[in-house]
């Protein structure tokens, strides 16, 4: 067993499913104790219990909506009460809401920005005092290739992801002297429930389109993102900060089709 994250406390948002669940599993396998945040209480609790049993790590499942400052502050307080600190923060929770920019209602725009961007700020604000005090910490923001490419009607989602990347650069510069590393991952299309829901709404041909968009001719697996997350949050990446690691099967190498 690889114990590269032993004695590390990692808080992961949107942990109950998809990429967040894969990161939780990979981190547990590497020996980290986990605080798992999600709005899906039953699935999140089941995952926390199963990881604790399988990998003999300590886990805490917290039901929290990352779009609420009160819920985030409560979740971080629960994490600190249980473990005393948060060493690694993974901002992963997000919603995928599209909309024609000439018609998108304020409520949809604000939900995307609050859940996908302001959420990361709320979490960072809550864990930062402890990280600064210990002069150690690692923050990972899950962005998207949508921050690098144009796709019709994904303005709000792309704006949130672009904001996360700008925040990553900004904070990496500011927090370097405190030995806090801040990085991002921009995934391509990954096989998760988020994309299953889009296929259900838009049709099976979307999967084939997604596969063709990538130089490798396929979509990615949540485990492939989790492996990159483990690297960036481990001592192996000790001199890497302010980086956006693109886990996208060559999507950004190809012309847009
Ligand atoms: N799947 C992809 O193709 C893809 C591509 C690029 C980036 N991403 C990003 O990767 C991350 C994970 O995506 P995924 O595909 O695994 O999504 P998913 O929908 O499969 O899982 C997201 C998880 O976040 C939780 N969540 C949603 N809103 C929440 C809230 N307000 N508070 C707390 N938890 C909440 C959900 O319950 C779910 O467990 C997201 O940031 C997404 O934008 C995904």
Image (spheres, rainbow, N blue to C red):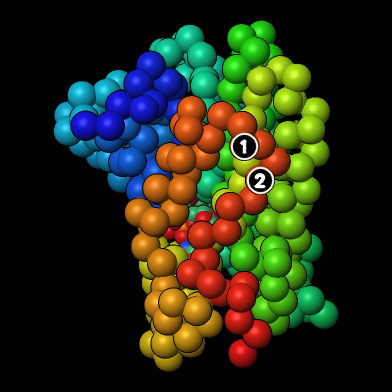
What number is the disc on residue 223?
none
Q: For residue 203, what is the image quadrant? A: bottom left
Image coordinates for residue 109, horizontal then vertical, percent: 74, 62
Task: Where is residue 92? Give x, y as percent.
Answer: 53, 46
Whether ligand 1 has any atom under 8 Å from the Cβ at mark 1 is answered as: no
Tell me if residue 137 can be seen: yes
Residue located at (76% from left, 42% from top): 169
Ligand 1 neighbours mark 2 (CB distance < 8 Å): no
* Quarter of the picture holding the C terminus: bottom right
Q: Name the residue rendered at 44%, 22% in the picture.
A: 9
- Label 2 SS: loop
* Most foreground residue, 173 or 120: 173
- Mark 1 lies on residue: 240
Tell me the crowding category of disc 2: few under 14, some 14 to 19, or many 20 or more residues within 10 angstroms, Cα based. Answer: some
The span from disc 1 to disc 2 (Cα, nearest Å) is 7 Å
Q: Is residue 103 above or below residue 185?
A: below
In the displayed orientation, state which residue is furthest to the left.
54
Task: Please state which of residues 179 and 61 is positioned toward the viewer in this rendering.
Answer: 179
Q: Residues within 10 Å of mark 1 (few under 14, many from 20)?
A: some
Q: Secondary structure at mark 1?
A: loop
Q: Which residue does the image show at 50% across and 78% down from the upper left?
A: 214
Q: Quadrant of residue 44?
A: top left
- 5 with respect to 245 (left or right): left
Residue 134: image location, x then y, percent: 61, 9
Instruction: Confirm or deny contact between disc 1 and disc 2 (CB under 8 A).
Output: yes
> Which residue in the structure is indicated by mark 2?
243
Which quadrant does the N terminus fall into?
A: top left
């Amino acid at each position: 067993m690889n114990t590269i994250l032993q004695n590390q406390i990692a808080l992961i948002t949107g942990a109950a499913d998809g990429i967040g669940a894969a990161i939780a599993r990979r981190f547990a396998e590497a020996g980290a104790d986990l605080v798992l945040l999600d709005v899906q209480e039953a699935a999140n609790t089941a995952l926390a219990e199963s990881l604790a049993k399988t990998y003999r790590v300590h886990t805490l499942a917290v039901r929290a909506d990352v779009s609420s400052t009160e819920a985030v502050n409560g979740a971080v307080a629960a994490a600190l009460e249980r473990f005393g600190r948060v060493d690694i923060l993974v901002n992963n929770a997000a919603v995928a809401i599209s909309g024609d920019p000439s018609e998108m209602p304020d409520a949809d725009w604000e939900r995307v920005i609050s859940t996908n961007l302001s959420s990361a700020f709320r979490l960072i604000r809550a864990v930062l005092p402890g990280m600064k005090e210990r002069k150690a910490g690692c923050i990972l923001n899950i962005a998207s290739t949508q921050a690098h490419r144009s796709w019709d009607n994904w303005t709000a989602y792309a704006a949130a992801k672009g904001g996360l990347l700008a925040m990553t650069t900004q904070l990496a510069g500011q927090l370097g002297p405190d030995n806090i590393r801040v990085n991002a991952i921009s995934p391509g299309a990954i096989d998760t429930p988020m994309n299953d829901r889009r296929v259900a709404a838009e049709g099976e041909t979307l999967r084939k389109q997604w596969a063709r968009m990538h130089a490798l001719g396929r979509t990615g697996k949540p485990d492939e993102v989790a492996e990159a997350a483990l690297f960036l949050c481990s001592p192996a990446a000790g001199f890497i900060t302010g980086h956006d690691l693109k886990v996208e099967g060559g999507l950004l190498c190809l012309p847009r089709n």
